[in-house]
Image (spheres, helix red, strand yellow):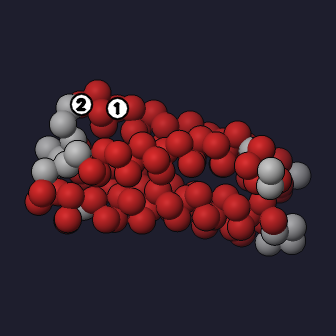
């Protein structure tokens, strides 16, 4: 098992990416091909950023700050998808948002630990 696979933030982001993939698969055709690819890309970018930050030593803080912006972008995309009625239900949106907030909190904790 790789070192990054043991991180709680990696597992949470991986689960989030899988969940987003499932959600996008169930979207209407219009949303599946408009905002769906952006949601998939953002969720996968989060996972890749965590792996890169885990292996970086000197530039970890920089990578975690970039991850913060990627997470914020994803949050905006989720909100946009919700407001445009892309999600089948509000509960589906809330579950995605809760997963994302968990990842954001873990990122902030990791960032604070790295900056000490």
Residue 45 in view of the camera: yes
Residue 97, position as x, y percentages in the image: 40, 38
Q: From this viewpoint, which residue is outermost toward the bottom? A: 59
Judging by the rendered image, the residue that carries numbered circle 1 is 94
* Residue closer to the observer: 37 or 82: 37
Q: From this viewpoint, which residue is outermost toward the top? A: 91
* Residue closer to the observer: 48 or 71: 48
Task: Verify CB contact (< 8 Å) between mark 2 and mark 1.
Answer: yes
Q: Residue at x 81, y 68 (%)?
A: 56
Q: Residues within 10 Å of mark 1 (few under 14, many from 20)?
A: some
Using residue 32 as the reference point, say whether residue 69 is left or right of it.
right
Using residue 34 as the reference point, say whether residue 58 is left or right of it.
right
Q: Residue at x 73, y 49 (%)?
A: 5
* Residue closer to the observer: 14 or 84: 14
At mark 2, the secondary structure is helix
Q: Residue at x 70, y 40 (%)?
A: 8
Q: Is residue 115 above or below residue 37?
A: above
Q: CA distance from mark 2 to mark 1?
A: 6 Å
Q: Is residue 71 above or below residue 101?
A: below
Q: Residue at x 19, y 48 (%)?
A: 27
Q: Residues within 10 Å of mark 2 (few under 14, many from 20)?
A: few
Q: Is residue 91 above or below residue 12?
A: above
Residue 17, position as x, y percentages in the image: 48, 50
Judging by the rendered image, the residue that carries numbered circle 2 is 90
């Amino acid at each position: 098992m790789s070192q990054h696979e043991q991180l709680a933030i990696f597992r949470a982001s991986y689960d989030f990416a899988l969940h987003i993939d499932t959600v996008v698969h169930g979207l209407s055709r219009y949303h599946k091909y408009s905002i769906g690819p952006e949601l998939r890309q953002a969720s996968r970018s989060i996972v890749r950023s965590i792996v890169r930050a885990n292996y970086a030593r000197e530039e970890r803080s920089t990578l975690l700050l970039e991850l913060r912006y990627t997470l914020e972008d994803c949050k905006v995309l989720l909100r946009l998808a919700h407001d445009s009625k892309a999600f089948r239900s509000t509960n589906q949106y809330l579950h995605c948002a809760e997963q994302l907030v968990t990842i954001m909190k873990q990122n902030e904790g990791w960032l604070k630990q790295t900056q000490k």
